[in-house]
Structure formats: structure tokens, C-alpha cells
Amino acid sequence: MDSLVRALLAATPPALSPAAATATLTAWRAAIAPSIAPFTLPIDRALVAAASADRLGYAFVAGYTEALRALVPTAVDALALCATEEGGNQPRAIHTTLAKADGGSGWIVTGKKKWATGASSAGALLVVASTGIGADGKNRLRIVRIPTSAAGLRMTSSAAPFVPEIEHAEIELDHVAVAESDILPGDGYDDYLKPFRTVEDAHVHAALAAYLLGVARRHSWPDLVERMLALALAARAVATAEPKLPTTHVALAGVLALAAREVPDLEARWSAASTATPDAAAPDPEWTRWLRDRRLLETAAAARAARRERAWQLLA
């Protein structure tokens, strides 16, 4: 814990060239690699990386990437989860298929994914695919690890109007051949897709706190440094808990509530500091990026509320 806290209190964004060729997510990842290398827990790597970010987008990527590492500890490449299709990401909406290849040698994946976060910068995709409908009428899902260089895989990338550093992609899988070893063990929904929602929330909100800790440090707000550090460590504890338990969901709801309470105070100070510059017409560019990107914090609010309510029902 001591080495982690010391790293968080010393982290600074790397000095990247403003040139388009270097001031990118890839360049940032390469620059911070030595800082996160000493840490083995995915959540610790996410925290140190986010504290070294100068924008919310990089912090989100740090949390998201390490959340996937926590979900699939054996992964070597950076991963992207490919679940969402035209009808959404619920099990019944998954029409991408995983079927035995002709002759029974290997497997074939065919289908389309509508929204895959970070796929263009990943080394491999975790594709949610169906093996058919079971006797209980439920869609049977598996997770297949597919290199982004695989034959038959086509990717079309795009960026949202906010957090443009995070590219999203549409994926087309045209009879992509995979081996038995590429199919992850366990149920695709119960063991991966469903718990990932909790794992991702904990890692991303820990990264958010670490990023804002860095903001507070750069503006010399020691009281906010302390509060953001406490929030980051609380999220860290949740991130290492069993993601399927209702107690974890209740604790995570508490972390999200604390974040919702703390962020406005930091924003108020940040806004005042940004406009109190000699040239108020040119405010702090990091503050400008924050205003552009902060709506990311509001995504999936309904799903989080439903998870919290369900957790309390189970505990009752």
C-alpha cells in the first residue's frame, strides 16, 4: 500500500509532444509503461496510470483496460470486449455465432458487433458469441479471444464527440477461424459479461479518483488530494472484491455516491482557477477537455441504479 500511495502522490503526466503523431493514446501508454511496471494488481496499475493522465479519456482507458485484465488474468495483449449488437448486449441480443468448423477441426465465429470500446488499439478482442439455445430456452454464450489481425475480421473505427481519445469500432467477423484454446472457460454471461459491469465500474471510478487526485496536486489543493486519495483507495477495495456478491454492489454504490458528492467541489475550484488566468480568454486546456468529456460520468446511470436496488433486495 505504501508504494502505491507514494506513486499516486508523485505521478505526473508525461511531457508528450503536441504533434499529432505523438500526442496520442498509444504514445501516452508507452510513456507511462515504466511507472506502472512495478505493480502487478490490475487495479493498482489503473490507479497509477490514471494519476499520470492529463485528461479523462486516458484515465478511463486505464481503468477499462485493467478491468479486462482483472477479468482475464491470463491475457497478454491489451483487450477490448465485443458484446453489443444491433439489439443491445443482453444475452437474447447476441446473434454472433460460435460453431464447429466443417470437419470438426476448430471453430468458426461469424457475426457483427456494433460498439467495441478501444478495439482499434487492442491486440485481441474478447468476442461474446452464441453456441445456440439451451433446453431452458436461454441463449448459451461463450467468450472467444480473437487477435485483431485475424483473417476475416474487419473493423471500422469512429470517435464520439466527447472523449475523442477513446475510439469505438464496429466489428464484422466473417467466418473467423479459432482454436479450442481461444475459447475461454466458463459461461460467457455469468462468468464474464455480467460481472464485468461491476469490475469495470470499480476500476473506472478508481481511475477517475486517481486522475482528479492528480488535478488537485497540480493545483495545490491538499484537502482535495486527501479526499480523492481516500476515494481511490475505497474504489480499490471494491475492485478486489468478488464482483458477483450483492455486498460488493452495495459498497460500489457507496463509492459512486461519494464520487458524485466530491466531484462538484473540485469542479468549482477548477473553474475558478481556470478563469483567474492573465488571459481569461484562453482557459486551462485540461479544464476545457474536462468540460467536453465529463458527460462520460453519466453513462449507464440507470443500470447502476438497478444493480444497487437488486443488491439491497438480495440482502434483505
Image: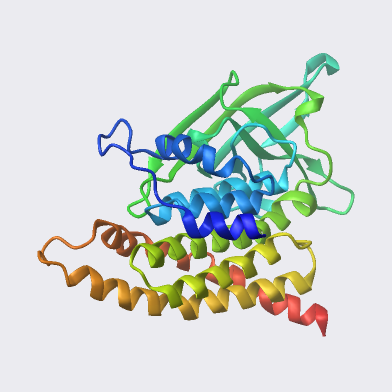
Name the quadrant of the C terminus.
bottom right
Indicate whether 233 appears above or below 227. Answer: above
**Nearest to the observer: residue 152 or residue 285:** 285
Most distant residue in the bottom direction: 316
Residue at image point 61% right, 43% down: 81
Residue 132 in the figure: left or right of residue 50: right
Indicate whether 275 appears above or below 214. Answer: below
Residue at image point 60% right, 21% down: 150
Residue at image point 63% right, 75% down: 253
Instruction: Estimate the x, y position of residue 94 in percent, counting from the top left.
Output: 66, 46
Residue 174 in the figure: left or right of residue 215: right
Name the quadrant of the N terminus.
bottom right
Q: Image quadrant of residue 242?
A: bottom right
Residue 19 in the figure: left or right of residue 188: left
Q: How many marks?
A: 0
Q: Image quadrant of residue 223?
A: bottom left
Instruction: Estimate the x, y position of residue 313 in percent, counting from the top left.
Output: 77, 81
Instruction: Estimate the x, y position of residue 115 in percent, counting from the top left.
Output: 51, 45
Residue 87 in view in this figure: no
Indicate whether 212 appears above or below 305. Answer: above
Most distant residue in the right direction: 135
**Nearest to the observer: residue 6 or residue 166:** 6
Q: Image quadrant of residue 125?
A: top right
Residue at image point 14% right, 60% down: 282
Instruction: Estimate the x, y position of residue 176 in percent, counting from the top left.
Output: 65, 23
Residue 177 in view in this figure: yes
Tell me the colour scheme of the image: rainbow
